[in-house]
Image (cartoon, rainbow, N blue to C red):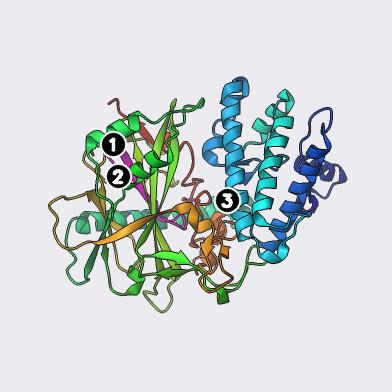
Amino acid sequence: MNLFPGIAKCAGAFLAIGLLAACATLTAPVQPDAGWPTPQARACVDWFAQLDAVTDSAGVRDGSAYRVPGFAYLRLDRFLASFRDEVATRREAFDAWAERLLQLDAQARAVELRNLPQQFLPLAGVASKPAAQAQTQRCAQLLAGAVLDSAAARVLLAQRARVPDDYADWKRGLGLYPLTRIPFFKGVEKWQQEAAQQVQQRGGAEAEATPLLKYAPASAPLAAERVTALVAQIKKDALGIPQPSAQEQALLLAAYAPLFEIETSAAYDRFGALFWRNEQGSVNTNGRGNASAPQVDLARPQVYQRLAYTRYQDQTLLQLVYSVWFPERPRSAALDLLSGTLDSVVLRVTLNARGAPLLVDSIHACGCYHMFFATPGVTPRPAPQARMEWAFVAATLPALSAGQRVLVRLASRSHYVVGLQADRAEAGGPRTPYTLADDDALRALPVSDGFPGSTRSAFWPSGIVPGTERGERIVFWPMGIDSPGAMRQWGRQPTAFVGRRHFDDADLLELRFELKAP
């Protein structure tokens, strides 16, 4: 394994030989007490070292999940990290947990290999991407089997299963965060007041001056009884995590696909599928590449979808996540710090155990503008301290039945959510159908005029979409977020300037809301 990046980080932080050695130990592959048992295992350690070096050199590292130090074949997200203490004493639960970490790494490795330019092959004598993928899967299973039977290795894995947050303490220190957070929070409060007023005034009204374009999923809604039965039949693993089949997942995501009403002034208010043009160039080794951003195909209205989870006490609840991508957020004035290339709105529906919506929340893909829409099934909890972004409930919703879709109203230009309500079955007028696509497709987008079959991620290894930087980063950096306002990948979306909060925090709902008994 290439140790130089890890060593450099430790050297810069501590400038001590002893701590350099500790850092090298952290990044070195964990091995059984008796050493690697076979030449095949030792060869697999070398394979991952070379694969990681080439992946980083080509700039195709996928940053959505955290690579567990010392376990080259395991990756972790915030949801799975929340189980680290519970699995320590239950072998069956640990094995189910480790299998999910293996799957996360396998998914990321498949994306990285798919995006790897052909000139980086052959690699260690492996000439093709399918062969490299097969070799990676074999080695992951072999090393996991060799290491994770060890009680000491299991303890070490649980200790290291902590996903770093996306806040830089050094920026907050340099920016005098304890002082600067006060005026920043006043700005947050002002936006919340304005947003609540917009939702109240425009949520259910037709646009007066701006044309209102309406979009609906191409799939028909499902009856409440069918959705309830569908959720009830989903199996759970040893961790209590629902495991819907591919068909069950597709049905559930289609059932709750939202309807949109978008105030439309120009092409920047239309959404579509993302793709790359070949002339937009490639990403360099530091993950910062050039300033180009993916393009939006407005001829193909498309909503990206994913299944996610949250935890509430001893329950794991299903979440359905949908995102739309616009070509830009246009300028509203000569100096507009919020404008820039690409804009995306993300909507998430959290279901109760019977498959009915409990809570809807939304952000822009930058992590900005986090707002909640609560049903009678949840009660907001107070913030633990003053002057922190906690849970902005923009409006309340009536009780929603299983399978009931929501209707989302977006403003022109800013694409702010200015209304959210249960779908009005009686609402008339034509609706443009949109298709649903897997959100993970953004990790390997087609290059329209490149080498046949070539792909490129929409994201840098940092999780930021290239070319989407906003002027606000010049002002907001003291809050500790890298490039505030830039579009971000799932799993890399901090949602608070004041405080610490991520869109995928496993305890986001549990800390902020109390679920009422059904």
User: Quick check: 47 left or right of 185?
Assistant: right
Question: What residue sits right under mark 2 in the picture?
Answer: 255
On the rendered image, what quadrant is the C terminus found in? top left
Magenta highlight on residue 351: no
Q: Locate residue 463: give its quadrant.
A: bottom right
Residue 167: give its label: 3
State whether residue 137 appears in this view: yes
Q: Which residues are magenta?
A: 357-376
Q: Farthest residue in the right direction?
A: 17
Q: CA distance from mark 3 to mark 1?
A: 39 Å
Tag 2 near tag 1, CB within 8 Å: yes
Give residue 172's position: percent from left, percent from top: 59, 53
Nearer the camera: disc 3 or disc 2? 2
Question: Residue sitting at 29 percent across and 25 percent down?
Answer: 517
Q: CA distance from mark 3 to mark 2?
A: 36 Å
Image side of residue 360 versus residue 156, left or right: left
Mark number, residue 431: none
Q: Mark on residue 227?
A: 1
Of the two numbered discs 3 and 1 in the rendering, the one whose residue sits closer to the viewer: 1
Q: Position of residue 314 (x, y in %)?
A: 44, 25
Name the kind of residue labelled 3 in the image.
Answer: Tyr
Q: Give the residue displayed 58% in from the left and 54% down from the top.
A: 111
Question: Residue type at mark 1?
Answer: Val
Which secondary structure is most common in the magenta stretch? strand
Q: Dot 3: within a 10 Å radius of its alpha carbon, few (fewer than 14), some, or many (20 or more) residues? A: some
Q: Nearer the viewer, residue 311 or 283?
A: 283
Name the one closer to the observer, 407 or 361: 407
